Amino acid sequence: MHIPESLQDLASSEAVQLLRRPKTITRVFEGVFSLIIFSSLLTDGYQNKMESPQLHCILNSNNVACSFAVVASFLAFLSCLAFLVLDTQETHIADTRFKTAFQLLDLILAVLWAVVWFVGFCFLANQWQHSPPKAFLLGSSSAQAAIAFTFFSILVWIFQAYLAFQDLRNDAPVPYKRSLDEGGMVLTTLPSPSATSSVNMPTTGPNSLSYASSALSPCLTAPKAPRLAMMPDN
């Protein structure tokens, strides 16, 4: 099957490659889950009771619970948008320190949001458990959806922290990596000991002295045998 060149160029474009990254896909899920929590509690999270026209939070009439979920989901959505914009510029960052700082900030915020959503899930579930049954005519499905996607947000933010940690570990600068590599190159260019010994070995012959014999101390040389002298007869 022949694929047109326009589709091949589109598949290899920078935007498509960015959308195919696991980090980008995770950020999209985080933003969608935050929007679901935000819209569920903002639209149907406040209801009035039959005997009162005043609006109350459907989570045990605790306005703090609804306010916490709405504000946290809104800030999480803005955080996802901000990091999506920064992800588009990550490949163009030449400064290693700035790139490391960006990855470290991504890891810290991912862990922080995972903790926030864990606390939020426990808080919202506890308030919903203590809510009186049929206290409100509407809003129960919205409350259950908000609690469910609060739990899902914990999982995606933990996965986001894992991806940020992997990027930080893979791209972490090694201070002495370059010097060690250069040292390895220098060592590989040095000749082997056998080659140096064969090159530096002096030539020996009947009319030449070896380096070892010339380096010996005179006191270590073997003593000469005494010669007998013949005395002439008188």
Image (spheres, rainbow, N blue to C red):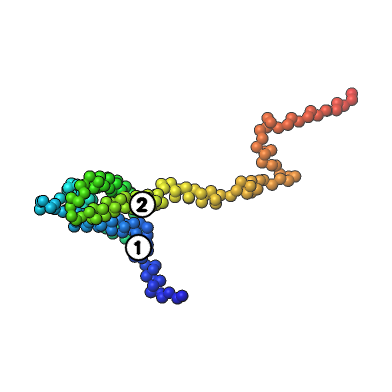
- Above or below residue 172? Residue 4 is below
Circle 2 SS class:
helix
Find residue 150 and report its horizontal and vertical position in percent.
Answer: 28, 51
Q: Residue furthest right?
A: 233
The residue to which callout 1 is attached is: 19
Q: Foreground residue, 190 or 219?
A: 190
Mark 2, Cα crowd under 10 Å, few <14 / some 14-19 / many 20+, is: some
From the viewer's perspective, tell me whether residue 99 is left or right of residue 52. Answer: right
Find residue 218 and report its horizontal and vertical position in percent.
Answer: 68, 32
Q: In percent of the image, x 22 and y 50: which residue is there?
A: 69
Q: Foreground residue, 4 or 219?
A: 4
Find residue 159 and report its horizontal and vertical position in percent.
Answer: 36, 52
From the viewer's perspective, tell me whether residue 129 is left or right of residue 179. Answer: left
Q: Quadrant of residue 29?
A: bottom left
Q: In percent of the image, x 10 and y 51: which residue is there?
A: 52
From the viewer's perspective, tell me whether residue 153 is left or right of residue 71. Answer: right
Find residue 133 and report its horizontal and vertical position in percent.
Answer: 21, 49
In the rendered image, is residue 93 in sight?
no
From the viewer's perspective, tell me whether residue 224 is left or right of residue 28. Answer: right
Which quadrant is the C terminus positioned in?
top right
Name the mark on residue 208.
none
Q: What type is the residue that disc 2 sits on?
A: Phe
The residue to which callout 2 is attached is: 159
